[in-house]
Amino acid sequence: MSADTGCSSAWQDRRSETAPHLVGGLRMKMEESALRKWLEEVEAQFLQQKVWRENADVKVHELLEENSKLRAKLQVSEEVAAEAVDDFQYIMRHNKFLDAELRKLKREMHTRKRGRNKTVSDGPSDSIESESDGEIRSLKEIRRIGVSAPRIPIKRSDVDAASPANRSESFGGGPRDE
């Protein structure tokens, strides 16, 4: 072997010894740079997720407040609806009561008219016109007294007494102020 080859082999040995250090150092720097980049990306993602979570928490808080307001409105609406249903049921019961009272009055008027046709006229006060006026007055008196008052049986003598000339207190009234 020549000295030249010996030198070159020594140089190659040195190069082989130093080359891995250079390559390894470069590789470590590249890996370190890649790791730093990756770490920065992870930190950015973490910060973004933190902002998203904070925004989501704020949004959830706003939605909970809106939900509680809507629940309060719903409760008020349900109470109003329940009152409306109660009022409607009361009106329907009252309407049934009034219908029953109207049927009774119609039946009574029909019975009286039938009874009048069978009797002999006692004079001008028994004419149909004066009787119908008396009946109208008695219905007005019943309305004036009100539905809650006990039912007053109307007799023929009461109708005659209700004429303008013979006002009586038999209808719960007395002289009316007109």
Image (cartoon, grey):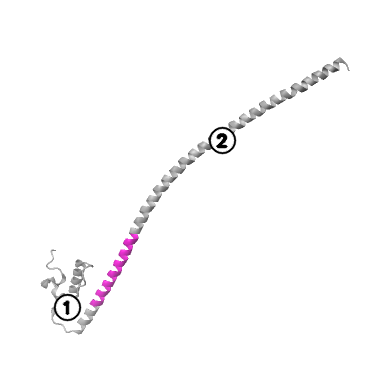
- Mark sitting on residue 114: none
Q: Relative to residue 86, is residue 144 drawn left or right?
A: left
Q: 140 or 55: which is nearer to us?
A: 55
Amino acid type of disc 1?
A: Arg
Vertical placement of residue 162 versus 37, above or below = below
Which segment is the magenta one? Answer: 84-109
Q: Residues within 10 Å of mark 1 (few under 14, many from 20)?
A: some
- Pick out the residue farthest to the left: 165
From the image, tell me which residue sits under label 1: 156
Q: Quadrant of residue 121?
A: bottom left
Per the model, the C-alpha gap separating discs 1 and 2 is 100 Å
What residue is at 26 percent from the left and 77 percent from the top? Answer: 107
- Pick out the residue farthest to the top: 3
Q: What x and y, as percent, mark residue 155?
A: 17, 77
Q: What x and y, as percent, mark residue 46?
A: 55, 35
The disc, 1 or 2, on the residue closer to the chain's N-terminal end is: 2
Q: Quadrant of residue 137?
A: bottom left
What residue is at 23 percent from the left and 79 percent from the top? Answer: 111
